[in-house]
């Protein structure tokens, strides 16, 4: 027996006990997003201490770099969303954003200079700004109702 919450017969309702299947792309996107965010948060939790103590940067330079990183991510959100909507290639834009984040972590592996660390922080946030809107539009579009 199908229970309808409304009087509208066009409202799709699954039968009790029936679970809709998760699209494989949505599952992959969730895993990649989780792992990228996990690795980023692990780095960011110690980045300020490493940047000022080990690399020897000043607190004001740290603030400037953090501001540039947040500005780059916020300003790219609009552009990435507009481009992905216009082209319809949301997956490519989301993957490019994850690529930026991976590239940034590679930069972190090979440098400990102030310039390299600043570049890491800005490129990583560029990746976040570039992948966010296309990912948020692409994932739900892949899931059937």
Image (cartoon, rainbow, N blue to C red):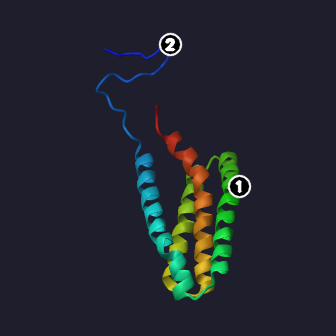
In this rendering, the answer to whether 50 lies above or below 89 is below
Between the residue at mark 2 and the residue at mark 1, the CA separation in whole angstroms equals 39 Å
* 65 and 96: which is toward the camera: 65
Whether residue 105 is visible here, answered yes or no, is yes
**Disc 2, SS:** loop
Residue at 31%, 23% (x, y): give it: 16
Residue where numbered disc 2 is placed: 8
* 82 and 112: which is toward the camera: 112
In this rendering, the answer to whether 125 lies above or below 81 is below
Left or right, 25 with respect to 86, comes to left
Left or right, 57 with respect to 109, comes to right
Residue at 71%, 55% (x, y): give it: 79
Q: Which image quarter holds the N terminus?
A: top left
Whether residue 111 is visible here, answered yes or no, is no
- Residue 81 in the image: state x and y as whole percent: 66, 50
- Residue 31 in the image: state x and y as whole percent: 41, 55
- Residue 105 in the image: state x and y as whole percent: 51, 74
* 37 and 79: which is toward the camera: 37
Residue farthest toward the front in the current orientation of the protein: 59
* 27 and 16: which is toward the camera: 16
Dot 2 and dot 1 residues touching (CB under 8 Å): no
Crowding near the residue tagged with mark 1, few <14, some 14–19, many ≥20 C-alpha atoms within 10 Å:
some
In this rendering, the answer to whether 133 lies above or below 109 is above
Crowding near the residue tagged with mark 2, few <14, some 14–19, many ≥20 C-alpha atoms within 10 Å:
few
- Residue 18 in the image: state x and y as whole percent: 31, 28
In this rendering, the answer to whether 59 lies above or below 84 is below
**Disc 1, SS:** helix
Left or right, 19 with respect to 33, comes to left
- Badge number at residue 79: 1
Q: Could you tell which of marks 2 and 1 lies nearer the N-terminus?
A: 2
């Amino acid at each position: 027996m199908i229970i309808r919450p409304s009087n509208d017969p066009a409202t799709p309702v699954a039968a009790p006990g029936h679970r809709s299947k998760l699209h494989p792309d949505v599952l992959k996107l969730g895993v990649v997003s989780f792992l990228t965010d996990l690795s980023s948060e692990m780095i960011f939790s110690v980045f300020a201490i490493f940047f000022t103590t080990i690399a020897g940067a000043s607190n004001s330079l740290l603030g400037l770099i953090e501001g540039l990183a947040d500005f780059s991510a916020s300003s790219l959100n609009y552009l990435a969303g507009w481009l992905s909507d216009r082209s319809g290639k949301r997956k490519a834009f989301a993957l490019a954003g994850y690529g930026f984040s991976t590239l940034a972590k590679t930069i972190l592996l090979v440098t400990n200079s102030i310039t390299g660390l600043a570049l890491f922080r800005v490129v990583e946030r560029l990746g976040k700004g570039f992948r966010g809107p296309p990912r948020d539009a692409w994932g739900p579009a892949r899931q059937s109702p």
